[in-house]
Structures are given as C-alpha cells and as structure tokens.
Image: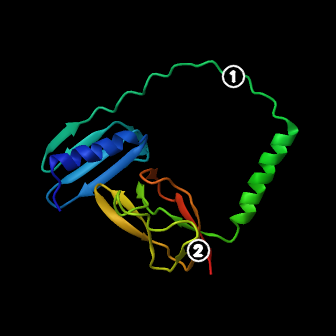
Amino acid sequence: MTLNIDDVLEVLEIVRECKDTELHIDTGEMKLSITRGKVSGQGGGFIEQSTVAQEPAAVAQVEAAPPAAVIAAPVAEPQEEPQEEAAALQAEAESEAVSEEGLIPVTADVTSVFYRKPSPEDSAFVEVGDEVEEDTIVCLLEIMKCFRQVMAGTRGRIEKVCVESSNLVEEGTVMFLIRPD
C-alpha cells in the first residue's frame, strides 16, 4: 500500500478534527506519524504539538489550528420545571431503560464514519423490526476511504438504530440494539 499526498492531506484533515490524537502509519515505503494535542509520549510525559514525519529523513511541522475564539453569551437563568413535567421525563427515562434491558449492542470497533446504506440511492441495510442473523450486514464503517462491513453478530430483531448515517462514531459507540431470539 502506498500513500500519496492526497491521502496524507486527508489524514491531516481527520486529525485536525480531533482534539488529542496520535497516529502512526507504516507502509514499508513510508512512515507517517502524527501527534496532535496532549497525548502520552515515549517518556510518559505529554506532547503538545503536531508533527508529520516521512522516511527517509523528510520531516514537516504542521501547525495545530488555534482554538476558535469563544464568545460569551448571556446565560439564561434556570427555570423551575413543574413537578408534573419532571415526573413525566423521569418516567420516560425509566421506561426506556427497562425496554433496553436484555438488548445486545452492536458497537463500533474503531473511530470511523457510520453509513446505514451501501450507497446514497440504495435502501438501508437494516431497519427497526428487521430480523437479523449473525452474519447479516447492518452498516458500513469508513476509515480513510476504506469501507468495513459490520455484521450483527447475533440472531434477533433490530430494536433501535442509535446513530444517524454519515456521522462520526468513536470506538465503543453503540450503533444498534438487537433483541436476541
């Protein structure tokens, strides 16, 4: 696998969107190491810089984007919620927690972009209520223009889709909830 300048620029764009990131890619012909924000370094300390290194000896410094200016907005005084509304919200939260009991989550195993469809004009892989098998494809995860199929991993019925299509998901994010058979 070789990386061209467009691939490197795309990686840099992804890293720029993350607060604290450390990435190492070794293709044999080229080594790419990117560090941004506060991440643990070799000596146990923290590194607060962004660097890109390419073998054999070319090293380029990449400036981390300065934090966006924060504009103070007036803070609204918290309003007292009527007890009836508070009780209704609590009851709704409790019923949702009870209804999710016994469901099996399908989680992202890597930070990536979540897609419910194989292409924009196609229908979703699965919908709420669909029966799935262990090897049923439920979504795609995109990492640097590489797509990975995600399988249900269990027999059952899709109870909930927890993520909107085209959103970034982090490792461990629950994407679907399945009620096992």
Q: Nearer the viewer, residue 28 or 146?
A: 146
Residue depicted at 36% across the width and 64% down the height = 118
Q: 141 above or below 152?
A: above
Q: Nearer the viewer, residue 30 or 167?
A: 167
Residue depicted at 85% across the width and 35% down the height = 82
Q: 18 above or below 29?
A: above
Residue labelled with disc 2: 157
Q: Is residue 117 visible?
A: yes
Label disc, if present, on residue 122 of the rendered structure:
none
Q: Amino acid at mark 1?
A: Ala
Q: Amino acid at mark 2?
A: Arg
Q: 155 above or below 106?
A: below
Residue labelled with disc 1: 76
Kind of element beneath mark 2: strand
Residue 58 horizontal side relative to residue 8, left or right: left
Residue 34 horizontal side relative to residue 3, left or right: right
Q: 132 above or below 44?
A: below
Q: Give x and y (percent) for residue 97.
A: 72, 60
Residue depicted at 33% across the width and 51% down the height = 23
Q: Is residue 41 visible?
A: no
